[in-house]
Image (cartoon, rainbow, N blue to C red):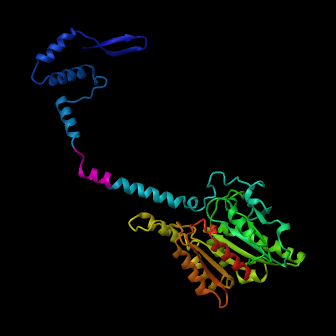
Amino acid sequence: MLGVKRSAHGTFPAFTCRRPLHHYVVGLSLGPANPWSAVSRSTTVENRRYGSSLPGISQVESIDSGVQDVVTSSSAPSTSVLLSALFGLPLALWAYKCLMMVMFQRKIIYMGYIPPGARSETLDSMDPLLQGLQAEKIVVASDPGIKLEGFLLRKEASAVNTSPRRVVIVYFQGNVGSPIQRLPIFRKLCLAVGSANGPLSDLELDLIAVPPRSYGLSTNARPNQRALLSDYRAVVEHVTIRYAELDKRDGVQTKIVWYGHSLGASIATCLLASISKQGFDDRKIVCDGLIFENGFASIKGMVRTLYPQRFLPYYWLTPFVADDWNAVDAFQSSKEAGSMINTVPKLFIASEKDEMVPTEMVKRVYERAVEHGEPGIPCEWLGVKDAMHDFAYQKPSWLSGITRFIAKL
């Protein structure tokens, strides 16, 4: 049954047929009741003859046992397998997602790359939003190798009343996009000055928006809480020095207002809390007013706001938050450290239909500011009805509240 065939490559076993094929067919069909036993015996004999198994055929005593093994292996899975598939797979997926959220949390918090093109977008002088406004490029050096690039906007000089008063708004942006996406807000603020009947009719207004690293045209470097505090500190120092010199030259008294929105509001609060009285006394950094709009109480608070269900694992990820931006604790710690945050007039703005930051969260920061503020320092609240997170500026009460606050400084 198994012969030897010789070829140019050597000698190797090969199948040869020593009997007519019908002999084997008849033998199988008319043989014992279990013809597979005959095949098994024949296989065993051939294995003994050549000292090895036939190619592709395992050495088994009986194909009967092999058939029985196949039947046994096709039975229903055990209970442990079912439980592992039912509970193990979801748990593994949850664990994987939690791990990714912890490892890449800064990619989730600091999204300067959204929308696409935000990192390369520049001001277009033909943009209708810039009509009636003057734009000036601003470049600030931060940490070694870090360059921050933004712009200054003001109403055209021919349309501004000459005034001995000037207000500069330093804008702290939220966690998404670049300052260019906030042009509608900037335009509304800049055009509010010079109006005959408005509260800002007798002053000039400059608005400065310089994004931190990884945002806009600033250096693409990894952001974190320490880095962003350093970047914005460099910005406000630049603004302080610039306008101190302009005041001497022009004989104008400048008030500098920090205006933060969303995450930017928490950044402005934490930065102000980190500045000691020494910095204010030396006039290295000036802040004459703080506008806190739809800001976070903390990142940990936002995690539990987005995932309030305690049975979900995300609710319990707060111990792993790297950059907390805790605006609530900033007021308490700043009072103990001798910071000047509690001596600065403040305006808190909350969109009453905010889809991201609950009004109660902004209220909690406001209440802490009132609690720790020094007597006689204004701390105002402005709730903007029917406004969402990014669109409070579209409501008349938003502009009137900000202009009144600035006019009283």
- Which of the image's four quarters has the N terminus? top left
Image coordinates for residue 134, horizontal then vertical, percent: 81, 63
* Observer-nearest of 242 and 59: 242
Residue 108: quadrant of the picture: bottom right
| For residue 32, above or below residue 238 | above
Whether residue 145 is visible? no
* Observer-nearest of 125 and 194: 194
Is 292 one of the magenta-colored residues? no
Residue 68: quadrant of the picture: top left
Whether residue 383 is visible? yes
Is 82 one of the magenta-colored residues? yes
- Which of the image's four quarters has the C terminus? bottom right
Image coordinates for residue 36, horizontal then vertical, percent: 16, 24
Residue 399: quadrant of the picture: bottom right
* Observer-nearest of 6 and 69: 69
Image coordinates for residue 398, horizontal then vertical, percent: 64, 73
Majority secondary structure of magenta residues? helix
- The part of the chain drawn in magenta is 76-86
Q: Residue at x 56, y 83 (%)?
A: 367
* Observer-nearest of 39 and 380: 380
| For residue 336, above or below residue 349 | below
| Most distant residue in the left direction | 33
| For residue 397, above or below residue 48 | below
Q: Residue at x 57, y 62 (%)?
A: 109
Q: Residue at x 60, y 85 (%)?
A: 370
| Most distant residue in the front direction | 197
Q: Image check: 323 left or right of 118?
A: left
Q: Image check: 98 left or right of 237?
A: left
Image coordinates for residue 261, horizontal then vertical, percent: 63, 69
